[in-house]
Image (tube, grey):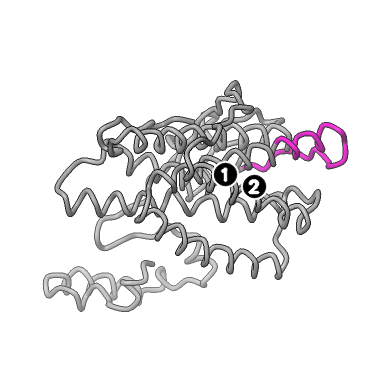
Amino acid sequence: MPAAARIFPARMASTEAAAPHAKQEDDAASPQAAATPEQQNKKPVVSYWGIEPRKLVKDDGTEWPWFCFRPWDTYRPDTSIDVAKHHEPKALADKVAYFVVRSLRVPRDLFFQRRHASHALLLETVAAVPPMVGGVLLHLRSLRRFEHSGGWIRALMEEAENERMHLMTFMEVTQPRWWERALVLAAQGVFFNAYFVGYLISPKFAHRFVGYLEEEAVESYTEYLKDLEAGLIENTPAPAIAIDYWRLPADARLKDVVTAVRADEAHHRDANHYASDVHYQGMTLNQSPAPLGYH
């Protein structure tokens, strides 16, 4: 039941709703309506407002099990993308962005060492912040200037959601320890505010920074794959959520998942470097079409 419905019962929200709710209350008093909490939880939520959950099925006819994404959100990753591409910093802002990102490698390596799954958890909690911040700021800009965004709001929100799905996937691989959760809390709080201010001051620097951050992510997942191939990490079966999200084979392994995630990060790398280039050419993002569905 929605939180608003718990706080403000529907029969109090409208005088016209009194009659239907009277019938519902009569039904609830009947013996058939009496049910244990477990039985009630198994029933579909029926909304007075006419919002009914859609019944979705997979290609094999089984029920779709995920609420966090839908069948039309799934895709096959483009693993043919060049993961070795690198933007050579030339402008001062680019050099600063590159230096900041590279300097983060030292504490990362000391803290996580070869615990790639734990590093992935922290990485994805941070990587999902920039596109959300950028999308929100572009959304507000579009509203106050009465202009289109060129599709960039949606593109950045897609990127943020994709990064969040990476996190949900690795949550099936490992669970963060309490001090890792504390680190995430601190890192996310600091990074969100810093990136928010940075994007307001210089979007081209912000996107370039994320482009380099994604380059680091690609390198990190490449190291993850090397350890999987060397047998240093067990190549366990892929989580069910990953199989459905990336349309992987039923017998997919962890290596296939990491390969898909690395491909996603490479696409995010390209999109953010491209966005920065647009700004460097003296244009705003809405003057250049966004890479919608680029993954």
Tag 2–tag 1 contact (CB < 8 Å) = yes
Closest to the observer, 5 or 253: 253
Q: Is residue 258 left or right of residue 126?
A: right
Visible residue check, residue 171: no
Where is mark 2, residue-wise?
Answer: 102
Q: Is residue 230 left or right of residue 92?
A: right
- Tell me the residue at 66%/32% (across/down): 259
Q: Residue at x 35, y 49 (%)?
A: 135
Q: Is residue 96 magenta?
A: no
User: Residue 154 is drawn in which quadrant?
Assistant: top left
User: Mark 1 highlights which residue?
Assistant: 98
Nearer the observer, 193 or 2: 193
Q: Quadrant of residue 76?
A: top right
Q: Amino acid at mark 2?
A: Arg
Quarter of the picture containing the N terminus is bottom left
Per the rendered image, the range of residues in magenta is 222-240
